[in-house]
Image (cartoon, rainbow, N blue to C red):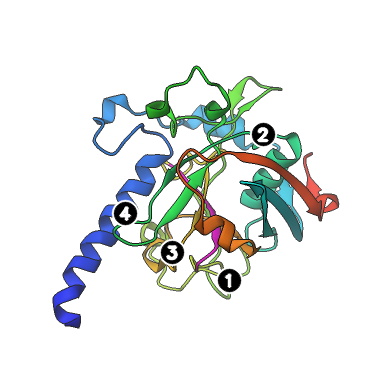
Amino acid sequence: MALYLRPFTLALAALLTLWLGACANSANLEAPPSDAAPAPGVSELAASSANLPVLEGTATVEMVVNGSPIVMELDGTNAPITAGNFVDLVNRGVYDGLVFHRVVRDPQPFVAQGGDPQSNDPSVPAQQLGTGSFIDPDTQAPRYVPLEIKPAGAAEPIYSETFEQARISAAPELPHTRGAVAMARSQAVDSASAQFYITLAELPFLDGSYAVFGYVTSGMETVDAIQQGDRIESARVIEGLENLRTE
């Protein structure tokens, strides 16, 4: 039985990985590449990487969906830039009212993904959700964060490379266990901005390719009940805001 199931499982893993990469910057998996939002160029990344928020230590975020709280512990020790970006966006109120625009449970539990700033605009069609980034009001340009993944036991994260690209065989310090909170991105490794996902199951095939920066510590029953189109009623930093550095 295991030998029969393995090819299907591997194929499904590959398909879901491709889908997750497409989610952040394309309307749907079937859209041709020309319809996807352009990946950030070198100059855009250089501008957006300057003075990125950094989380030194930990922070706790409470996100309310369908009237129930989801509590997330964010790890700035192992993912300082990725966690810092998220905490800063929460503190700015960016996530309030945004939609979970993609929720996948079949053929097996995968992720609930949201955080597209466009989803607060009722004039934006649903099929366009998944293409948006956070526009920094100070620069009027998208803010992108580099891919940041720390190998287990390493002193520092690696940046702008997947483990495969960097030829790293170690596991990440922050793996995709059930309830992991991570950044969605396009195929361009440094294209994460505001969109995030919560894993609905253990997804080890995503390890080393996407940046986990925290975990749900309570409220997974609320995450499990999220339906596509549900909104984030509110998100706030309830502990650790003093650990955020924005300059």
Q: Upstream in the sequence, badge 4 or badge 1?
A: 4
Determine the secondary structure under disc 4: helix
What segment is highlighted magenta in the picture?
Answer: 178-185
Q: Which residue is mark 4?
A: 16
Q: Nearer the viewer, residue 88 or 164?
A: 88
Q: Nearer the viewer, residue 126 or 192?
A: 126
Label 3 CA crowd tier, 10 Å (few <14, some 14–19, many 20+): many
Vertical comparison of 220 with 32: above or below: below
Q: Is residue 13 left or right of residue 168?
A: left
Q: Amino acid at mark 3?
A: Asp
At 39% from the left and 61% from the top, the residue drawn is: 109
At 48% from the left and 59% from the top, the residue drawn is: 199
Residue 52 % position (x, y): 68, 40
Q: Which residue is mark 3?
A: 207
Q: Upstream in the sequence, badge 4 or badge 3?
A: 4
Camera-nearest label, 4 or 3: 4
